[in-house]
Amino acid sequence: TNQRLGRLPLVIGMPVMITQNFDVESGIVNGCQGILKSVRYRVDDQGFRHAISCVVEAKDTNARESLPFLSCNQHVAVIEDKISM
């Protein structure tokens, strides 16, 4: 349809869904749902912020062993992904 979603506001505490399989053994998979806990941004030359990673609290995961630096065993890291529409 040549229509795009545009900008998606990321609000701490909003529900999110992971749409790719990042770590199948730990349960960080397509369809995994959680709550947005934090977002890291980069700022471009024009001053616009672009999300590069975030932390999601997802209760149906066991990512503690693969991501021991996170404060809670239900927190998972999600990284930037680029797609063409």
Image (cartoon, rainbow, N blue to C red):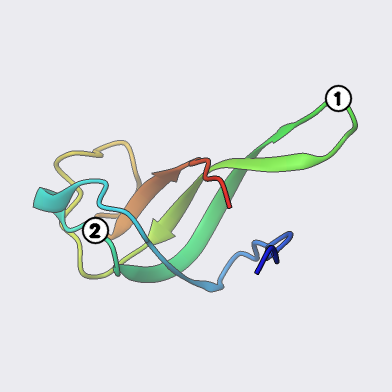
In this figure, which residue is indicated by the disc labeled 2? 29
Against 10, residue 26 (above or below) is above
Identity of the residue furthest to the left in this view: 25
Q: Residue 7 placed where, x, y %?
A: 73, 59
Kindly state the secondary structure of the residue where label 1 is placed.
loop
Residue occupying image coordinates x 20% and y 69%: 60
Of residue 38 and residue 43, the one placed in the foreground of this image is 43
Amino acid type indicated by mark 2: Val
Q: Residue 10 placed where, x, y %?
A: 64, 61
Mark 1 or mark 2: which comes first in sequence? 2
Kindly state the secondary structure of the residue where label 2 is placed.
loop
Q: Residues within 10 Å of mark 2 (few under 14, many from 20)?
A: some
Amino acid type indicated by mark 1: Asp
> Which numbered marker is on residue 45?
1
Taking the image as shown, residue 9 lies to the left or right of residue 14, namely right
Per the model, the C-alpha gap separating discs 1 and 2 is: 34 Å
Residue occupying image coordinates x 18% and y 39%: 66
